[in-house]
Amino acid sequence: MKKIFFSWSAIALMSLCIISCDKEEDQIVFDASKTKNPVLSVSSVSVVLAEPDNSKSALSFTVQSSDYGFSAGPVYKLQIDKKGNDFKSPVETTLGNALQKSFTVKELNKFALEKLSSIAGVSNDFEARIKSDLSAAVASLYSNTVSFSVTPYFVLQEYPVVYVPGSYQGWAPDKADQLASVNYDDNYEGYINFPDKDTEFKITPMPNWDADWGDDGTKTGKLKEKGENIKAVDPGYYWIKADIPNLKYSLTKTTWALIGDATAPSGGWDTDKPMTYDPVKKIWTVTLDLIGGKEMKFRANGGWDINYGDGAKDGSIPPDGALDFDAANIKVANSGNYTVTLNLGKPGNYSYSLKKN
């Protein structure tokens, strides 16, 4: 009986110890006054991305860990939002317990365009912070906010094309400028500069002379297989359209300008700001003062028959840096002196850029 009594006493004592230990753990009290917020730093405050640099490092965020007053393993999330949005709808990237997040040029370009709704060719302003989470029972800790800007590059889309060999480039189809069919319907268009008068050319479906279209001989905009050379009498920058199913073509000589209340007070919606063509870079440029919060567009020949904007007029498609025919006005974010670039040299991939000087 004594042995049995001793055994039960030992078990009771062990149970008491376990209960005592549990009670001590339950008595650990979280003291919010002893916490230390994480600290965030960024490697650059302004990044301009270029496709040839895709594999290079573009931007890094570094975190100094948070402190909860005791040994803990929080989960860190990098939050990025448009500047001025007060993190109402941030894009979150979970870092786990890592203390750094780095982007290559290609990764950051994709992230900026797809996740942050950035506009290519334009400086986009963002803010970032770190959110530190320990458990649902403990309030999140937030780092300081860092500001930075990213100028993404425009990602080209591939479309069906035809080739425009001619006297302006040595009659070489494999090296000729192209026209694109953005609707995949054999209707092609694009812009080509003819520096000399009486430039002659043809249109080929492939980068060779196996087949081609030329003028039907009437000089009335009708195409014919193996027809005569098409002629642009005056030198200039031409908008060329080719309707292959209906065997029609058109040539429209253009000069380009910027217009809008963003160009005030010297400009406005009734005053063009002429742009200058660079035949080497194949772009149009103008340097001028622009007003933040105001709008602008690109138009040809001092009228509205040919004009380009960015995004749908009804707002259903946001601006993305790609120019669309007769689309929404382009809003300028901040006032300043800018070099504005218009690039119509890549058919189906017309773009622009605003570079603050």
Image: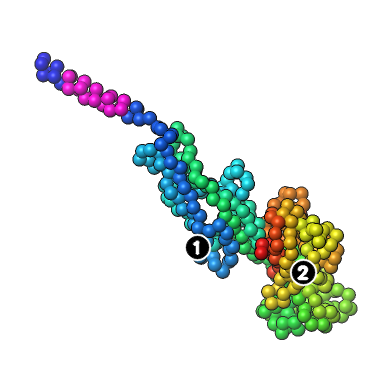
Q: Which mark is residue 57?
A: 1
Residue 203 percent coordinates (x, y) = 76, 76
Residue 131 percent coordinates (x, y) = 49, 43
Q: Residue furthest left?
A: 2
Q: Quadrant of residue 170?
A: bottom right
Residue at horizontal 57 percent and vertical 54 percent from the top: 148
200 or 130, nearer to the observer: 130
Color scheme of the displayed model? rainbow
Q: How many marks?
A: 2
**Label 2 is placed on what type of residue?**
Met
Q: Nearer the viewer, mark 1 or mark 2?
A: 2
Query: From the viewer's perspective, is 140 left or right of 212?
Result: left
According to the image, label 2 marks what residue?
A: 275
Asked if residue 136 lies in the magenta stretch, the reply is: no
Residue 55 visible, this angle: yes
Residue 310 percent coordinates (x, y) = 73, 57
